[in-house]
Amino acid sequence: MLSTKTGELLLLTIIYDGRIVQKLDLSKSRASVLTSGITTIGDSLFFLGSRLGDSLLVQFSCGLGGSNLPPGVQEEVGDIESDAPSAKRLRMSSSDALQDMINGEELSLYGTAPNNAQSAQKTFSFAVRDSLINVGPLKDFSYGMRINADLNATGIAKQSNYELVCCSGHGKNGSLCVLQQSIRPETITQEALPGCKGIWTVYHKNTRIHLGESSRMADEEDEYHAYLIISLEARTMVLQTANNLEEVTENVDYYVQGTTLAAGNLFGRRRVIQVFAHGARILDGAFMTQELSFKAPNVESGSSSDTSIVASVSIADPYVLLRMTNGSLQLLVGDPSSCSVSLTVPSVFESSKKSISACTLYHDKGPEPWLRKTSTDAWLSSGMGEAIDGADGVTQDQGDVYCVVCYENGTLEIFDVPNFTCVFSVDKFISGRTYLVDTFMQDSVNGLHAHSKNTEDVIRPGQKENSKDVKINVVELMMHRWIGKHSRPFLFGILADGTILSYHAYVFEGSENSSKVEGSVSSQNSISLSSTNASRLRNLRFLRVPVDNYAREEMPSGTQLQRMNVYKNIGGSQGIFLTGSRPSWFMVFRERLRIHPQLCDGPIVAFTVLHNVNCNHGLIYVTALGTLKICQLPSFLSYDNYWPVQKIPLKGTPHQVAYFAEKNVYSVIVSVPVLKPLNQVLSTIADQEVGQQFDPDNINYEGSYPIEEFEVRIVEPEKSGGPWKTRASIPMQSSENALTVRMVTLLNTTTRENETLLAVGTAYVQGEDVAARGRVLLFSIDRTADNSRTLVSEVYSKELKGAIPALASLQGHLLIASGPKIILHKWTGSELNGVAFCDYPPLHAVSLNIVKNFILLGDIHKSISFVSWKEPQLSLLAKDFSPLDCLATEFLIDGSTLSLVVSDDQKNVQIFYYAPKVSESWKGQKLLSRAEFHVGSRITKFLRLQLLPTTSERTATTPGSDKTNRFATVFGTLEGSLGCIAPLDELTFRRLQSLQKKLVTAVTHVAGLNPRSFRQFRSNGKAHRPGPDNIVDCELLSHYEMLPLEEQLEIAQQIGTTRMQIMSNLNDMILGTSFL
């Protein structure tokens, strides 16, 4: 199979008889994405990798006629951007039909000629199984308002009003990508609710219906919640949720006199358990069936009063684990036959003196529990392994329950429930090592332990100043496995300093047998070893996963609320919602964590899922300001990406986009390839070339040739989040390319009023024998009175010499780059009159930026020029004398200093500054280099955005000072990546630079690229004088928090600072640049 440049799939069939190839058959098969690589996976799938569109996983089957695809699968590999979600739901079908086909084919190869003739007519049928969203190549983007923006928001919450609209893709895969960094849920309703401590929704089933396993599962997914329990500061409210939320606090037997600590379902949703500080209640719907009060087990000690208060609760049907405030554990064990609960204290914890800092229950659900695979003797797995006889007589394997415990000294242990034998343990869980291995296995392999003892000794000397750093507890644990075909459990731990450790479990398949391990242990141990070894999860390992995009927050001491809330289906996604001052969604897709912050409501104190008539698979959360909101996740976004993304197909190549804020519309340059007859194309060339040999009349070329036709489309976001509407389209003339589109504000010199117009710069592309010409077009955009239609009317057009690649408005005038010069025009309301000009750029401008009265020009080969406008003239202040092929330019503002950023085709970024008083600037003619950096991909667009105030700065600075007037530039690349360049203050820069030098050797290099050499400026053989090394690479710095705690402390001590200081600097950078 071959793929062509236009995205057609071609099939080449080789027809042979014995060893002789008779003929080659090439036939068109299907249209698909513009492909840059094809590979087969297995014998029934192939992967279309694309740089310009979404990559697809396609299932194929071949037959001698009709389609062999499983029913219900669409047979088209077209542009399926819009169908991606539905395609994902299709699971792999059994490929039995396919096996038969392949066997049949082998036989027919050696048959007689008639068989071969038939086999040549094979038809292939394709079905898209999955797709990977691609937002590259990013040619241009603009920063606009979201549809559901909240105009009253202030501070950091205001940032989630914005989105990036990017031009991406090419040809028929061209699209607008809408990127949002933070999630803004769509509010259904909201209520004021001050003083809320927690919210829970619970189910209630009167009787279990005798149904098959599969229908029972489907039923569970769509069951509505019955009650919403709201815990306030001194009481508890209960609401019915079936249709509308109605308060039923008076009519139920729930404990309502104080705060509730947790609520959940037991016994297959037939009972509700509600846990409060001194007791618990079991309820059947609204009626209490049992009440427990927690008394201290050891009354003799006399301190019974303080031990019986519950600190945290974890529920895994039919067990409930309670951690008391004094660090002891109690377990409620449920009996499914009588639906009652009894209180026990596990014997392991009765005797131990170790205080527990956090614990949780993990329910390994399903007919094949995952953790059993990791124990070599699977049949020995503990009590829950036998099928449980439910009260309704249906025996079903409920899976296993495990208890995960972390002690004050940092050890993590996993016990099986209810026997409480230790099956896995790790020393120093808090240090956050890359791999977690059962210490029991390590002890038996002698050599491994010597190393960890050394690291402890290293830290001893510096412990005085770092004592705050070393004493870190785990305050919350969570282990969960989401539904999926090959899903593995995740383990999360939150430390007291706000760090989140996330681990992904996997089965270790080692080469050495357990017999070797046992042999290496001294004989006196061997008896105890073999007895405990049986139930150990000896092949269980955990790998640490980076938590990117997440800013840590200090945990205020004394908060007992659980911050991690597992959800199984909110708008089709699953994962964890993290409450707190920086709430975040941890979504799990393809066994990968995607972390999306939610900034729009500030801190969130409580969260729960809600599924009822009015709110389909939605959520409820309570903000710190005391508002309860019932919401749903926007369904049009795809969350399986670094940032949530929505793709709007254009069926053409987008080139540039500009946002018009007043009318909330975007104007986009789109080019669509149109097939023209070949003789028509050639005759236009022949018209210009008068002295040519051939006569245009006798051209009789058959066939057609694709020519790009340009237009400017005015598109408007759809309120419901559907596909965007094209409100108007401005076509260009034949062989005219639109090069730039900008919204400009011009001062009308006759009426003395400002007008906002849409300016378009174009060029006629007619071969190199014709002098280049271009047009400037000005349009006004208005709405009809009832907002139904957008009216676009041409105000002005003028033809100029030279192409017009860039335009901008400069203090009410229009600045036009036309060929090798820039001209400033004033606007009279009916025409443009030239006011001033300047003979720069030398060849052809690629970009034009303006700040106040300063102009930055990027030239296609001759680097950048810095021009200023003072009535009545434009004057060149300085330029960069070395050659450079510019791609994009922008100003970088840090307080009162102005820098010039430029990217080039060798994938570098350089930052220049203008300093006429410095001697090496040749009296100000030459721009001096401030910093340079090799990004590794071509940057096509910079966008200047104001840095947000971080926590440390909010208190210190006064408004209007240098600190507040700081801007970063966000950039997009042809690879489809986004990045940001931001100014740092001197002290932070020095600290992070010395950290970077340490990390070059401390962190393993990605793909063998040494960060120091890879980030050097690449000049491709041209003479280049290296500039100062004034950029720190956050890509490398972000690895610091992935290092084990001991190494973090050691590195911090070596560079003369503390871990807390480095962490707060890195955190401030994430907070300061969360623009979206």
Image (cartoon, rainbow, N blue to C red):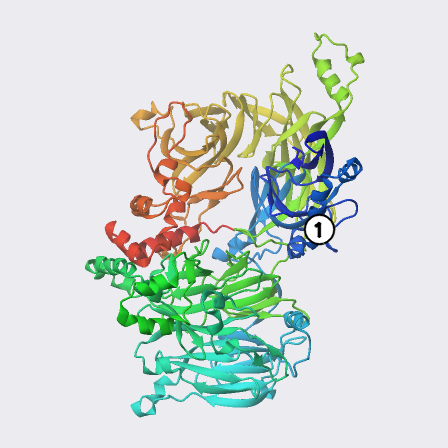
Q: Amino acid at mark 1?
A: Asp
Image quarter in which the N terminus is found: top right
Q: Which residue is mark 1?
A: 100
At 74% from the left and 34% from the top, the residue drawn is 27
Q: Under tag 1, what secondary structure?
A: helix
Residue 424 in picture, x, y percent from top left: 39, 69
Q: Position of residue 131 (x, y in %)?
A: 62, 49
Q: Is residue 78 visible?
A: no
User: In this rendering, would 121 be left or right of 961?
Assistant: right
The image shows residue 1006, relative to residue 697, as above or below, that is below
625 vs 946: above or below: below
Is residue 291 in sight in this rendering? yes
Q: Position of residue 754 (x, y in %)?
A: 60, 38
Side (left or right) of 796 relative to 1020: right
Q: Residue at x 56, y 58 (%)?
A: 184
**Foreground pick, 246 / 675:** 675
